[in-house]
Amino acid sequence: VRAIINSLELHWSKADQDLFLCALYLNPLVGPQIFNPNVLSPLALWNICARLYKRVFRVNDVPECFAMEIRDYHYRKGAFSNEFWNNEFLKSMSTEQVSLTLGGVLKLSPPLAFSQDPVEIWKAHYQPNPVTRLAVLVLSFVCNSAGCERLFSTMGDIHTKKRNRLGHQKVQDTA
């Protein structure tokens, strides 16, 4: 078990932690309640989101309303309240229950809907504010390269020495 934890910690140290944490935080099916506030406070999460906002939108400062919007998202107020952001509806869409703790930082016990696309939920709820823009963009990213690696591996299996005359489009369509 210790070897597995060490391996996870090694991979985590090499990962873009801000991107992973922000994607998890802004996932409406998981949300802020997943984080242990004694280890990662709301202010720390907001700073992570602000840093990522500046990085992905290539700006020096976040918009003035960003702090208020991210606070509203965290505490489910304003445009993110149950009136507009129906948590019970989101929870009812879940397909699987998960309960586990990762290093004291995350406590995965709320229902997680692996079959639902959080980007579509944000788009359906769309409010023209910086938090929504950040959420749609961050949740659209592929946070790791496993999907790409799998595709290239499949394409390599298809595009063998005997089949090297296949055009790029034919290989893509086959993969």
Image: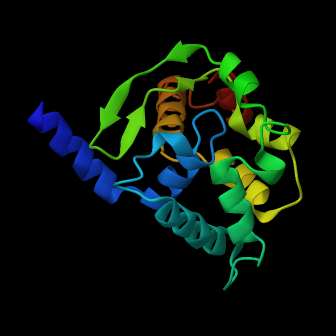
Left or right: 158 as drawn, with respect to 170: left
- Observer-nearest residue: 76 or 109? 76
Q: Within the image, what quadrant is residue 68 found in?
A: bottom right
Residue 167 horizontal/vertical position (percent): 70, 34
Q: Is residue 93 visible?
A: no
Q: Point out the residue furthest to the left here.
A: 2
Q: Residue at x 85, y 37 (%)?
A: 83
Residue 44 horizontal/vertical position (percent): 47, 65
Task: Please say if 76 is above or below 166.
Answer: below
Q: Within the image, what quadrant is residue 93 found in?
A: top right
Q: Point out the residue furthest to the top here.
A: 95
Q: Residue at x 52, y 56 (%)?
A: 19
Residue 99 horizontal/vertical position (percent): 39, 23
Residue 132 horizontal/vertical position (percent): 77, 54
Q: Point out the residue furthest to the bottom here.
A: 60
Q: Residue at x 19, y 39 (%)?
A: 5
Task: Please say if 16 is above or below 86.
Answer: below
Task: Please say if 13 is above or below 117.
Answer: below
Q: Residue at x 53, y 14 (%)?
A: 96
- Observer-nearest residue: 106 or 22? 106
- Observer-nearest residue: 158 or 46? 46
Q: Is residue 76 visible?
A: yes
Instruction: Look at the image and name its color scheme.
Output: rainbow
Q: Within the image, what quadrant is residue 82 found in?
A: top right
User: The N terminus is located in which quarter?
Assistant: top left
- Observer-nearest residue: 102 or 154? 102
Left or right: 151 as drawn, with respect to 17: right
User: The C terminus is located in which quarter?
Assistant: top right
- Looking at the image, how many numbered discs can be counted on the residues? 0
